[in-house]
């Protein structure tokens, strides 16, 4: 079995590996056909995350079902499915609450394609085992391409949780996306696209990069260029920090720009500590959320949005052939999708 292994920043190679097999009646074996490159993947390839041992690359993907355990119902060989990057059982008390990141059955943060959260393999491979398949997989809707939905299992669902609950609570609410230095560029733009799709009447996008600002405008957001983090930028019902800036400067812009009792969600990747504007949060009553997204709870809703508007993410995506993955990853665009011929 061919799989794309990464052994360090910009160090990628195709290698032969053992084929996975069904190990439980609740397993599925699937063949990935479209894999999107996560913002965290790009940070690692650029040497901006801690080193780790060699691992199989990729964790956001759409696949075709190859075989199923006898207890996997509702799916059949040949079905196209989105697979969650986060491994969770679906049956424990935490999963039933919609909190698979706190799954009581699996080790914390078990996931595909990171090499540090368990030995689950990666998506840029010929075959991958999916445990707890009924909970881990969702059918790809007819009319939605594998490339459009490749990120539903992680980044796109992460972006959805930044705005969905707030817009459900207050339809039409204003949204500010604080992208900052662009450590999570695709999530930043996904937040803007989903906010528009969910009915926000004002979506403002704050970033320093002209190319991403142009994409934000193409999505219908108001693009605002800022090379440094402003102390505050207006007052918004919903703010999303996607910066991942270790200093916390852009995160604090988002917090201070949140209206009274508004919602601020941070989906940037943070290591260590960043100072927070607790006084401003206290004065405004900010409702702040941070941490891994519970993607299994969001995937069906995100897929419904894509079913209604299957091309809404086209300005964000760049598709490259599967066989050219190493060359494409040498300098990845804002959101790279690796696709086998049958996914195009």
Image (cartoon, helix red, strand yellow):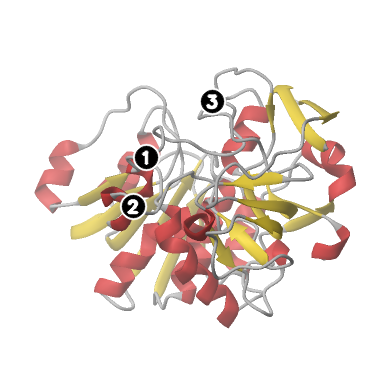
* Vertical relation: 275 (above or below) 143: above
* Vertical relation: 227 (above or below) 162: above
Look at the numbered discs 1 and 2 and tell me whether their residues touch, using CB distance below 8 Å. yes
The first of marks 3 and 2 along the sequence is: 2
Q: Is residue 90 visible?
A: yes
Give residue 48's position: percent from left, percent from top: 58, 24
On the rendered structure, is 327 left or right of 175? Answer: right
Q: Quadrant of the C terminus?
A: bottom right
Q: Nearer the viewer, mark 1 or mark 2?
A: 1
Give residue 317's position: percent from left, percent from top: 70, 59
The first of marks 1 and 2 along the sequence is: 2
Residue carrying label 1: 105
Q: Nearer the viewer, residue 165 or 63?
A: 63
Q: Gap between marks 1 and 3, in whole Å? A: 18 Å
Residue carrying label 3: 116
On the rendered structure, is 340 left or right of 301? Answer: right
Give residue 277's position: percent from left, percent from top: 22, 37
Q: Nearer the viewer, residue 38 or 256?
A: 38
* Vertical relation: 51 (above or below) 135: above
On the rendered structure, is 66 left or right of 162? Answer: right
Q: Is residue 330 visible?
A: no
> Residue 95, labelled with which disc?
2
The residue that appears at 31% across and 40% down in the rendered structure is 252
Give residue 27's position: percent from left, percent from top: 57, 50
The residue that appears at 88% across and 44% down in the rendered structure is 324
Label 2 neighbourhood size at 10 Å, few (<14), some (14-19), many (20+)? Answer: many
Quarter holding residue 67: bottom right
């Amino acid at each position: 079995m061919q799989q794309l292994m990464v052994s360090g920043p910009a160090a990628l190679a195709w290698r032969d590996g053992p084929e996975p097999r069904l190990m439980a009646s609740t397993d599925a074996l699937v063949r990935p056909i479209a894999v999107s490159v996560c913002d965290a993947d790009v940070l690692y390839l650029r040497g901006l995350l801690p080193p780790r041992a060699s691992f199989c690359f990729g964790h956001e993907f759409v696949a075709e079902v190859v075989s199923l355990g006898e207890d996997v119902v509702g799916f059949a060989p040949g079905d196209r499915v989105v697979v969650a990057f986060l491994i969770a059982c679906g049956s424990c008390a935490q999963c039933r609450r919609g909190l698979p990141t706190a799954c009581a059955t699996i080790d914390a943060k078990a996931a595909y394609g990171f090499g540090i959260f368990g030995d689950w393999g990666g998506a840029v491979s010929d075959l991958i085992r999916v445990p707890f398949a009924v909970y881990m997989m969702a059918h790809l809707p007819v009319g939605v391409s594998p490339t459009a939905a490749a990120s539903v299992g992680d980044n796109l669902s992460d972006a959805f949780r930044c705005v969905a609950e707030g817009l459900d609570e207050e339809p039409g609410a204003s949204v500010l996306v604080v992208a900052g230095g662009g450590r999570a560029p695709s999530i930043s733009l996904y937040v803007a696209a989903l906010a528009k799709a969910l009915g926000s009447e004002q979506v403002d996008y704050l970033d320093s990069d002209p190319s991403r600002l142009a994409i934000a405008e193409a999505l219908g957001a108001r693009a605002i260029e800022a090379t440094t983090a402003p102390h505050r930028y207006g007052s918004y019902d919903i703010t999303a920090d996607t910066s991942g800036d270790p200093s916390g400067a852009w995160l604090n812009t988002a917090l201070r720009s949140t209206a009274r009792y508004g919602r601020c969600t941070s989906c940037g990747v943070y290591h260590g500590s960043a100072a927070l504007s607790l006084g401003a949060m206290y004065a405004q009553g900010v409702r702040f959320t941070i941490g891994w997204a519970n993607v299994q709870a969001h995937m069906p809703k995100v897929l419904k949005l894509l079913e209604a508007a299957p091309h809404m993410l086209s300005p964000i995506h760049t598709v490259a052939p599967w066989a050219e993955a190493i060359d494409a990853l040498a300098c990845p665009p804002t959101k790279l999708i690796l696709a086998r011929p049958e996914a195009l």
